Amino acid sequence: MSQEAVESLLAVADPSGAVLEPYPGDGLLTQALARRGAQVTAYEPDPLSAAKLSARTRAVSGIRVIRADFTKAKPLREPFAVVGSLPLAATARIIDWCLAARTLTSATLVVPQEYAHVGQNGHWDPVTSTNWPWFDWQLHGPLARTDFRPPRTTDTAILHLHRRTKPLVHDQDSYTTLVHTGFANANVPLPTALRPRYPDVDEALHVTGITPDTPAAAVHPTDWVRLHKHLNT
């Protein structure tokens, strides 16, 4: 990444404390995180790249390089953040890992624009909608393709996930089931998708203000939260 892109990422992440970095590459971001006072653990799966980064940062305080697949690592017991620039092939797996880590406070990630469609054009994906009650999702950017070497072939943006101090929903299982049921038949109107499991869904949709012809992908996550509340009262 260019220095300008690194600064953009750091401005969003505001790193401190324990930070895990997947795919550190040449270590430009790794060293910038350490200069900000973060205690950085960088996970590099490629043996040669890991060895080079270890040698390059050996004298830098606050950096540890581990030759391993980030998604195979265990989350820290204490609160931590994740900051990194992700390749397309690993994006979904790393975000899933972050969302499942109970001690994660935030994740600030450079991701392909095609993945970072957080509410773009009124479209919401099931991962965002399912995890919205526990994480605030924000999209920053985009970054220029020339901010990377070699230049990337796809557009990228900065995705920031921040764990909410107070969850919007307490019953995670029932909320997750509701959203998954809606998205299981994503091409049909929401009442049609939900009615077999939730007989009172029409009244709940009316109270929530979701129109009968709305498909799951067009429902804002906050409306999923309200719909869940009405179906469980």
Image (tube, rainbow, N blue to C red):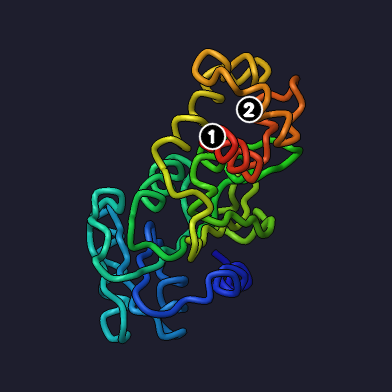
Which quadrant of the rendered structure holds the N terminus? bottom right
Image position, residue 154 (x, y; %): 62, 43
Q: Are marks 2 and 1 in contact (CB under 8 Å)?
A: yes
**Given the current orientation, which residue lies at the most extreme front position?**
233
- For the point 68% across and 43% down, the residue is 119
Which quadrant of the rendered structure holds the C terminus? top right
User: What kind of element bears circle 1?
Assistant: helix
- For the point 22% across and 59% down, the residue is 67
- For the point 28% across and 70% down, the residue is 78
Q: Which of 124 and 232 is in front in this view?
A: 232
Observer able to see residue 184: yes
Q: Which amino acid does label 1 sit on?
A: Pro
54 lies above or below 128: below
Q: Which picture quadrant has residue 203?
A: top right
Image position, residue 88 (x, y; %): 49, 42
In the rendered structure, the answer to whether residue 209 lies left or right of residue 179 reads right
The count of marks equals 2
Observer able to see residue 154: no
- The residue to which callout 2 is attached is 216
Marker disc for residue 126 = 1
Image position, residue 53 (x, y; %): 31, 69
Q: What residue type is labelled 2?
A: Ala
Per the model, the C-alpha gap separating discs 2 and 1 is: 8 Å
167 lies above or below 83: above
63 lies above or below 186: below
Q: Nearer the viewer, residue 150 or 115?
A: 115
User: What kind of element bears circle 2?
Assistant: helix
